[in-house]
Amino acid sequence: MDRALPKSQFTETSGVQWICPTCKKSVLRIKPDTFRKAETRSSQEAREHEAWDPEWIRYSYSCMLECSNDSCKEIVANTGRGSVGYDVTFDRDGQPEYEYADFFRPLFFDPPLSLFETPGECPADVAIELENSFALFFSSPGAALNFARSAIEALVTHLGAKRFQVQGGKRRPISLHARINLLPAQHAHVKELLLAIKWLGNAGSHPGGEVSVDDVLDAYELVEHVLVELFGNKSKAMKALAKKVNKRRGPKR
């Protein structure tokens, strides 16, 4: 997973490097004549201030993105915010030159981007919760973390952990923490990873909790690793190879 891309800004001329959520192979490009920006009301009002500076400018923008793959051509709607800052270029002598430029950050994509690729064998309910998380990543990191936690809850159910227990004659839900610890022995190697995702997800569930984009990316990296460990073909192939080597106790002869 590329951690830098989800946090990056872009300009109208520099383009974007988002990967198409449909073919998951090619880059999305801004569709010609669809990019629109407008200065917000508060930004316009700020121009009356005696200390006004171009860096006070704030925009809202919208555009249509198109997959660069000719066999896909998916269309993705995109909206977000913009501001003015310094853009750096270099002259022939390698000296920096500074000029004002408009920079933009996305808030929403429809359909949402896939911030990491899930293995083909990933359970459908887990994939759905992750897609919900991806949809909110840019606009609400806390909500995105909460959905990542929901994905882990669905995964733990898929792996065989009980959801309820009977206490005092009543059926009561088991906490996610306890369910992770109750996973069958063959999944012991992912328990610590799942608990880490749970702790991060808890922060997204609590009102007023301080959640950063990097917290969500930490959770995504952990989820991605767990899914590859459990459902990735490469992981399974490596485990099968290790089993063969262990069985013959060395190389082929």
Image (cartoon, helix red, strand yellow):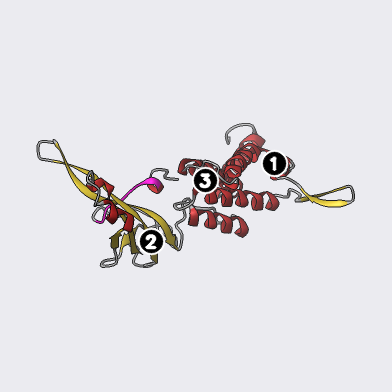
Residue with the most extreme right position: 169
Residue 90 visible in image? yes
- Mark earlier in primary sequence (3, 1): 1
Find the residue positioned furthest to the left. Answer: 92
Q: Amino acid at mark 1?
A: His
Residue position for label 3: 220
Q: Residue at x 75, y 51 (%)?
A: 163
Which mark, residue 78?
A: 2
Q: Around disc 2, counting alpha carbons within 10 Å, would you say few (fewer than 14), some (14 to 19), or many (20 or more)?
A: some
Considering the image in quadrants, where does the C terminus appear? top right
Q: Earlier in the sequence, mark 2 or mark 3?
A: 2
- The image's mark for residue 177 is 1
Q: Identify which residue is drawn at 10% across, 40% down.
A: 92
Amino acid residing under circle 3: Tyr
Q: Which residues are magenta?
A: 7-12
Horizontal and vertical percent for residue 69?
35, 63
Q: Which mark is residue 80?
A: none
Give amino acid for label 2.
Answer: Asn
